[in-house]
Amino acid sequence: MIPLFFLLISAASVSPARAGDVIGNGGHVLFCKGKAPVVLDQYEAEKFHPHSFGHLKGMAPEQVTHFVVEKLGASPFGRKFSSTLRQLGHPIDWQQVPRLELIPDHGPSMVIPNSCTLTQAALRKGTTVFLSQEVASQLSPEQLGILAVHEVVYKLSLESGAATTSTKARVVVKYLLSQWTLPDAYLGMIGYQHSTVESMPFGIYRGESGGKEVKAQLLRKNSRGDLLLSYDGRDFAEADKIRGPSLGQARFQCADFSDCTGTAQYAGRAIPAFVQVFGANGFELTIGGKSIRLFQ
């Protein structure tokens, strides 16, 4: 039997460009001579704004993530953050391994001082986060909390398609964990600038179902939260209900401007349908029990 540690080292060697969301990189910690180790996100934030994370000192990991949840409130991105945090769990829930091989995805602009060493603290594979015991044993509780926030934000940035490295995610983490207001433009960097029905652009959205292209067109939206889509639902509905290509329309009522409930028309039949808006230019459409993500 091959030890888990060697399996992880092999997994960590997968190229981020090929691995997509299978392997989540980032999760770096900086060890500098004579100083306590810090997560790279904090190091970058305090390089130009010293003590911007000072209010987190002494917090437990759960308190750090709660700070972010409270700051985001009931916004669409806040709900996404909270649900993803529940998926990944806190560092105490992560799978511990002796150590992890460094995956350098911190971007060409990052300069590490000669007296410092960059170390891989966490590695995500799907919704499983692996935590280096070697690094975690030297981190303070609030640093583990910062690491948890990083993993959530980076996963969301990959899902939106807005980033392939953790560079943009670390900028967003800086604003989430500071006491500054989070500008919409920074959420846009990781694909969440337009995450409500109100800001969805009109036009054609495309996806794939059963190896065939599915198209939907946003026809109408208004301030009441009404949404009208037309779609080409090839192999889209449940096979035992609808067979063959179907053209139709779906009408929705969007109570909170990101999650919409409605009905789709297939061959004169009304079928429950749902829309969940995510990212800068996409949404998930569910009709007849089958879901597909569509992008412009």
Image (spheres, rainbow, N blue to C red):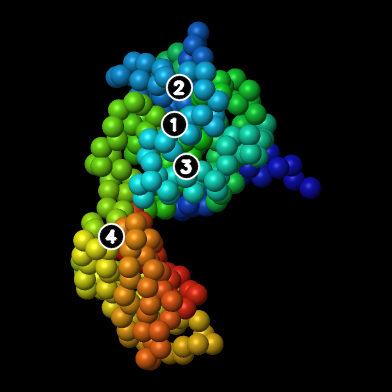
Give the x, y percent position of residue 243: 46, 90
Q: Earlier in the sequence, mark 4 or mark 2?
A: 2
User: Label 3 belongs to which residue?
Assistant: 152
Mark 2 or 3 closer to N-term? 2
C-alpha span from label 4 to label 2: 34 Å
Q: Is residue 275 left or right of residue 241?
A: left
Mark 1 vs 4, N-terminal side: 1
Q: Which of 73 and 195 is in front in this view?
A: 73
Viewer-nearest of discs 3 and 1: 1
Mark 4 or mark 3: whose residue is earlier in sequence: 3
Total marks placed = 4
Label 2 belongs to which residue? 56
**Do the numbered discs 1 and 4 sit on residues whose CB atoms are within 8 Å?**
no
The residue at which mark 4 appears reads as 197
Query: What amino acid does circle 3 point to?
Result: Val
Point 36% across, 65% down: residue: 260
- On screen, 34 above or below 209? above
Q: Residue at x 75, y 45 (%)?
A: 2
Depth-wise, is mark 2 or mark 3 nearer the camera?
2
Q: Residue 67 carries which label?
A: 1
